[in-house]
Amino acid sequence: MKIQSEIEALERLAALDAILAEVGEQLGVERGALEEKRERQQELEARIERDRGVMSDMERQRAESLQEMRQMTVQVDRSREKLARCRTEREANAVQRELEELRKLQRDREVEIQKLDALHDQAQADIAETEKQLAEIAGDLGSTEGAVTTKLAELEKIQTEKKKEREAVVKTVKPQMYRKYDMIRQRRGSGIAHTTDGKCSECHILLLPMMFQTLRRGESFDQCPSCLRIIYFKPPTAPSEDGDGEAETEA
Ligand SMILES: [Zn+2]
């Protein structure tokens, strides 16, 4: 058969491409999972830093409010002294109002400090929770990162080897045929199909009888009219693995 060696080269190429596709997919999954964990780690670290920033802002604000309260206490004492020295009722009333105003301001500051304390406690609890999550991820990464890195290295090694093998096989395929094969492979995931019983092994369309008869002579390739894969005739001798039937229904 004239095209037998070409068929074999294409089949070798297709087998290598199937392995490469699977290896590529596994690499993507493993890298993705690792990347996801690392991203989560960074995210949690950033959150802790942000919460710590918020906490120190609150601490500063609390210190300022406390300072203001102390100043008000001094003012209250002064007003009390002033009240004791008052000669007229009118003067005394004015100082009383001043005192009331000061006490109100003091109460406001107290409420503010209480609120800040509650928020501060909340932020502290949030940080503790985030730190717990971070420790879990770090532990997870610590125990799996080594194994994942080893697996990635193994997959990369297979990938390199198979790519090298592929390069050698590509040299045995006619350039024009290879270009056609690779274009279809990139679009469809695989580039070849065969027929034993008149149907395309990949898309299962029934080929036109004339096309099938020509293919059956085993002298030429064609392209499946539906999936466009390079198609050739495969005699029904070998047991078919994909179970698409060897019974020559059309005969
Ligand atoms: Zn097809």
Image: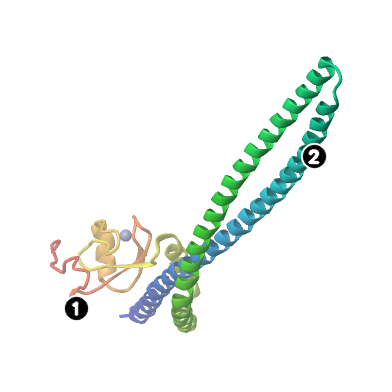
The residue carrying mark 1 is 238
Residue at image point 84% right, 29% down:
82
Locate the N terminus and report the quarter of the image it occupies: bottom left
Q: Earlier in the sequence, mark 2 or mark 1?
A: 2
- Are the two marked residues, 2 and 1, in contact with CB atoms closer than 8 angstroms? no
SS label for mark 1: loop
SS label for mark 2: helix
Locate the C terminus and report the quarter of the image it occupies: bottom left
- The percent coordinates of residue 243 (x first, y second) are 18, 68
Q: Name the quadrant where ligand 1 sits.
A: bottom left
73, above or below 197, in the image: above
Pick whichever, 120 or 4, lies toward us: 120
Pick whichever, 239 or 27, lies toward us: 27
Residue at image point 65% right, 51% down:
54
- The percent coordinates of residue 150 (x first, y second) are 46, 82
The residue carrying mark 2 is 74
User: Label 1 neighbourhood size at 10 Å, few (<14), some (14-19), many (20+)?
Assistant: few
Q: Can residue 172 be seen by looking at this rendering? A: no
Classify residue 212 by image quadrant: bottom left
Determine whether, in the image, residue 180 is placed left or right of residue 224.
right
Separation of residues labelled 2 and 1 (CA atoms): 103 Å
- The percent coordinates of residue 62 (x first, y second) are 69, 46
